Image (cartoon, rainbow, N blue to C red):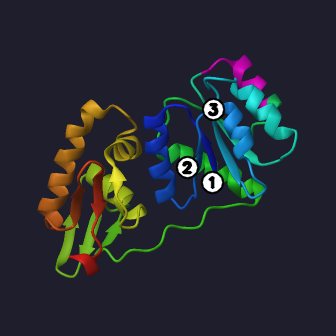
Amino acid sequence: MLLVEDDAGVADALTQGLRGSGWTVRHAATGRDAVAALTPDTDLVLLDMGLPDHDGLWVCARIRETSSVAIVALTARRAEASVVAALRAGVDDYVVKPYSLAVLLARMDAVARRAGTRPDPAPAVDAGFELDTAARRVRTPDGDVGLTAKECELLAALLRHAGRPVSRAALMEEVWDTAWIGASRTLDVHVGTLRAKLGAQVVETVRGVGYRLVPVAER
């Protein structure tokens, strides 16, 4: 898929979240670069409508001249006229900011399903336990461990990334629906409680990045 986003921080967080969910991501920071980067095997375009060189409507129109690829627009414009203009320009779905990563992934999956393309699932990882999200419990060989709602969501997010490092920003976006880095102390506290319940070696701090779930084979 092609991510068109001019904000480097947002692009990095989105890229990590999308890759952890099975998408192969290429990035373009301007409208002109996006049009140039489009290839026949691009299965979805995630298009920010506010770009530094061209409006997203221009980008969408240029793409539609040569391709029927699925396009999901990302925008802060809530007005009905903006939504109608984007849909008429050829976008397949319209996601208004701020949004959660979980909602964005669901909308992308729906668009991809209609278009007949879906990302490859993330590789499985042996975590040494089974997470029951409905019951908010971790089932281990030594017994069940209860979790709070956010502990459960955080652990599920780390599992989805299959043992790969996940940035703090991506985890805040995915679990707390916010990109406010100042609130990341909340993330640290929840990682601490997960370590206390499951073992200090289960969640690893990746310096300068964030956290990763450590597979059993690496503990």
Residue 53 placement, left or right of 63: left
Q: Are marks 1 and 2 in contact (CB under 8 Å)?
A: yes
Magenta region includes residue 86: yes
Magenta region includes residue 183: no
Q: Earlier in the sequence, mark 3 or mark 1?
A: 3
Q: Residues within 10 Å of mark 2 (few under 14, many from 20)?
A: some
| Mark 2 residue element | helix
Residue 201 numbered mark, or none? none
C-alpha separation, residue under disc 3 versus residue under disc 1: 24 Å
Check disc 2 and give the amino acid type.
Answer: Leu
For discs 2 and 3, the disc positioned in front in the rendered view: 3
| Mark 1 residue element | helix
Q: Residue at x 59, y 67 (%)?
A: 120
Q: Residue at x 28, y 75 (%)?
A: 129
Image coordinates for residue 55, horizontal then vertical, percent: 69, 23
C-alpha separation, residue under disc 2 versus residue under disc 3: 22 Å
- Quarter of the picture containing the C terminus is bottom left
Kindly report the secondary structure that dominates the magenta region of the rendered protein.
Answer: helix
Q: Residue at x 49, y 30 (%)?
A: 98
Check disc 1 and give the amino acid type.
Answer: Asp
Q: Quadrant of residue 118?
A: bottom right
Residue 105 numbered mark, or none? 2
Check disc 3 and give the amino acid type.
Answer: Thr
Image coordinates for residue 171, horizontal then vertical, percent: 35, 47
Number of numbered discs visible in the structure rendering? 3
Give the residue number, with chain letter if any, for mark 3.
30
Q: Are marks 2 and 3 in contact (CB under 8 Å)?
A: no
For discs 3 and 1, the disc positioned in front in the rendered view: 3
| Mark 3 residue element | loop
**Magenta stretch, residue numbers:** 77-87
Image coordinates for residue 22, horizontal then vertical, percent: 54, 62
Residue 109 numbered mark, or none? 1
